[in-house]
Image (cartoon, rainbow, N blue to C red):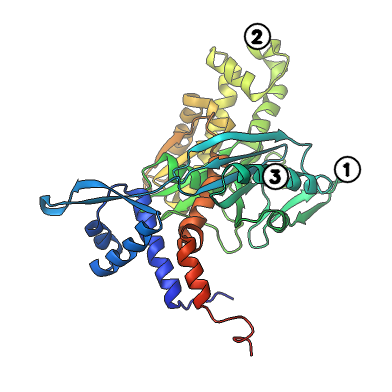
Amino acid sequence: MDKNGKNLDDLQDLNRSSIIRHLAMHEGCSRVELAKTTGLKQASITKIMRALVENGVVAETGFTEGLKGRRSIGLSLNYSKYLVVGVKIAWERLSAGVFDLRGRVIGDIFSCSVDHLNLANAGEAVRRVADAIGKFRRRHPNLAAVGVAVPGPFHREEGSVYITREGSGDRVYFPLLEQIRARVPLPVVMDHDANAGALGYWWFRTNCDTGMALLYLLASEGIGGGVVSRGRIFTGQRGHSSEMGHMVVEFGGRKCVCGGRGCLDAYASSIAVEGQAAKLLAEHPGSALSGTRRLGIGEIFAAMRRGDGLARDLVRDAGVNMGRGFASLIPIFDPDLVVIGDLMAGGGDVLLEGIDDALGRFLSPFYKKPRIVLADPGDDLVLLGSAAIAIDHVYNHPTELLMPDAEAGRAAARPQEGTTRK
Ligand SMILES: [Zn+2]
């Protein structure tokens, strides 16, 4: 049951959280500006800032030109006093890194390949992730939280991932979050990889406009999606929302891995494009793709860049199908920014041309076409996003995770268990 009531401690934490969030997006702002934007009284701001500065969470960074030309003291978050760990669990690879609160990588990234994640090897994957975090902790004792991005289907409330039993098509939910928490003595939070990517892009690749609605399409071997609205991930009731890969773009169309037909995943994922290439190659003996040993998406993009007609058509078609999907998604989510990330972002201008063509034909003129951009295909937004969900958690619980002295005082003032239960 959701408990909506707030004790005085919770309110203090909430106010600290909104100040920290504003500072994270407006470096160098003054106490007067904070009072204006948060709606807190100047005296409250002064009191909260004193605690934040004393605990080293915020630093005073010299004078800034304030309101009415008055000079005031600029404030900035101390982005490296505490660090977070971001973990990306993909079907065939585990990666992890330490990040500061600006999303910058500190030190080396841990990365290893695994056999396709299934019930038999999931425990081993958990052990490897926990060992990597243990090594990070020895080098960085100031870790505040761990964020983990996982592939879907993901049950957000239970923190479990739907994986196969080895050697069979059966799928079961594996309690990944619970297992990692049992081995890692830090707060651990988990989200779907596409949600993490969306939040990572919003936090670290835009100017963090809280009024912005961002729609992120994680277009890789499969397709996922995430929506960030008012700086938060849109989760739906149980966290199953934004599964954009399984939106139907062609009724009764190609069979999809989910068991359905006509899903976007079956038309615009890298595996779908590779499948189409293999199918159409016999009809295009002159294509540069005929000579390639491996018909992977990298080879298809390379042939497209060299002007190969078949490769260009395949990528453009993938774009047209994404555009068909967006023609449905734009009226639902009303985004101002659509970001296409991961492997398929390598389709570049040809992919965008296909999207534009479809939107011109299928999107009602009533709706404003959002800005559509491709993320840098080399930018691991899901790993960055795993750090972003950890940072988001830290910003939601500043007293506990950034102010250990204040938290110790708060814990001492709480009634002892046992006395409250009697
Ligand atoms: Zn599907």
Q: Nearer the viewer, mark 2 or mark 1?
A: 1
Q: Residues within 10 Å of mark 3 (few under 14, many from 20)?
A: many
- Furthest residue to the bottom? 422
Q: Give how far apart the Cα atoms at labels 1 and 3 are.
A: 24 Å
Q: Quadrant of the C terminus?
A: bottom right
**293 to 126, vertically: above or below:** above
Ligand 1, by image quadrant, is: top right
Tell me residue 35's x, y (percent).
26, 62
Q: Residue at x 35, y 57 (%)?
A: 53
Tell me residue 187's x, y (percent).
60, 57
Q: Which residue is mark 1?
A: 167
Give SS at disc 3.
helix
First in sequence: mark 2 vs mark 1: 1
Q: Nearer the viewer, mark 1 or mark 3?
A: 3
Whether ligand 1 has any atom under 8 Å from the Cβ at mark 3 is answered as no
Say which of 216 and 119 sits in front: 119
First in sequence: mark 3 vs mark 2: 3
Q: Which residue is mark 2?
A: 286
Q: Residue at x 53, y 39 (%)?
A: 381
Q: Amino acid at mark 1?
A: Gly
- Furthest residue to the right? 167
Q: Amino acid at mark 2?
A: Gly
Left-right relation of 360 to 286: left
Give SS at disc 2.
loop
Q: Amino acid at mark 3?
A: Val
Q: Residue at x 65, y 56 (%)?
A: 185
